[in-house]
Amino acid sequence: MNNTPNIGTCIALSPDMKLFELIDAHPSLLSIFLRLNMALPKGDISVGEVCRRDGYSVDMFLMLCSMHLSPSYRPSSISLKKDMLEGVVGYLRASHRYYTTYMLPHVASHLDKVLEHCDSLSERVLRRFYTEYVEFLTRHFEEEERNIFSISESPDRLVSADFSMLEAPHGDIDDRTNDIASLIFKSLPEGVPTPLRCTMLEHIYMLRDDLRRHSDIEMYLLRPIVAKYQNGR
């Protein structure tokens, strides 16, 4: 694998770069540390040293960073190894927990502040829409856990399993997330303070973009690695 992917005009990523340099250039990557439960170290430690300390493949870690930083980044087939499967599935499971225990409740807390300035009808409509959205995402995550992740952790089942679900676009999730943004932008009373509305929109778009990266990781990391198992490569 080329260990120094260049993400547009961003700094090149490599195992030898200092962790602070990585985070200082790309603060959004802190969410990866949250998901993987990687403690931020004391001192001037490198990316490779942190990965070795916590038992993660540095190649996989840099792929995850690259996919979060650039929507168009795709790892080459030759760089994907079968022994990355456990780490990728672990990361995707951790992402589900990150959404359900952190991001979705965080958006809900901002929604509560917005709804304080709404009439009762707008409050009911938006609260119901968001509740249904969370329920939809939760069902989707549970289906992936049951039909993809659990099978991926069982070598005997993995070889013959049908993973076509991974190839289906996650358009419904994207559409529903955009619908919430549209409601916030177009349908709320003008009395809702602009700072509250803007903050709410920022977090919704952050969630939408993160869910897109999640789908990309399933499609362009997990699916090709599973294919290597199934094809005996």
Image (cartoon, rainbow, N blue to C red):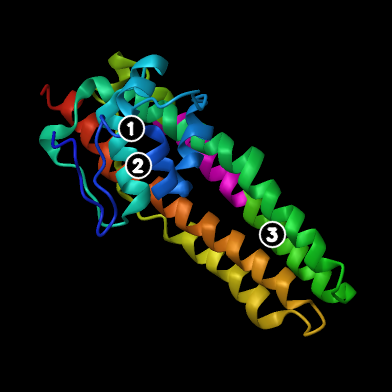
Query: The magenta stretch spans which residues?
Result: 136-148
The local crowd at label 1, few if under 14, some if 14 to 19, many if 20 or more residues have their Cα within 10 Å, is many
Mark 2 or mark 3, which is nearer the start of the sequence? Answer: 2
Question: Does 147 lie within the magenta span?
Answer: yes
Q: Residue at x 47, y 61 (%)?
A: 174
Disc 2 designates what residue? 65
Above or below, 170 relative to 121: above
Tell me the tag on residue 130: 3
Q: What amino acid is found at the position of numbered circle 3 in the picture?
A: Tyr
- Quarter of the rendering containing residue 113: bottom right
Distance from disc 2 to disc 1, alpha carbons, whole Å, reads: 6 Å
Above or below, 152 relative to 195: above
CB atoms at circles 3 and 1 under 8 Å apart? no
Disc 1 designates what residue? 61
The image position of residue 63, as x and y in percent, is 28, 38
The image position of residue 33, as x and y in percent, is 48, 33
**Quarter of the C terminus within the rendering:** top left
Above or below, 189 relative to 33: below
Most prominent secondary structure in the magenta stretch?
helix
Q: Residue at x 31, y 19 (%)?
A: 157
- 132 sits to left or right of 82: right
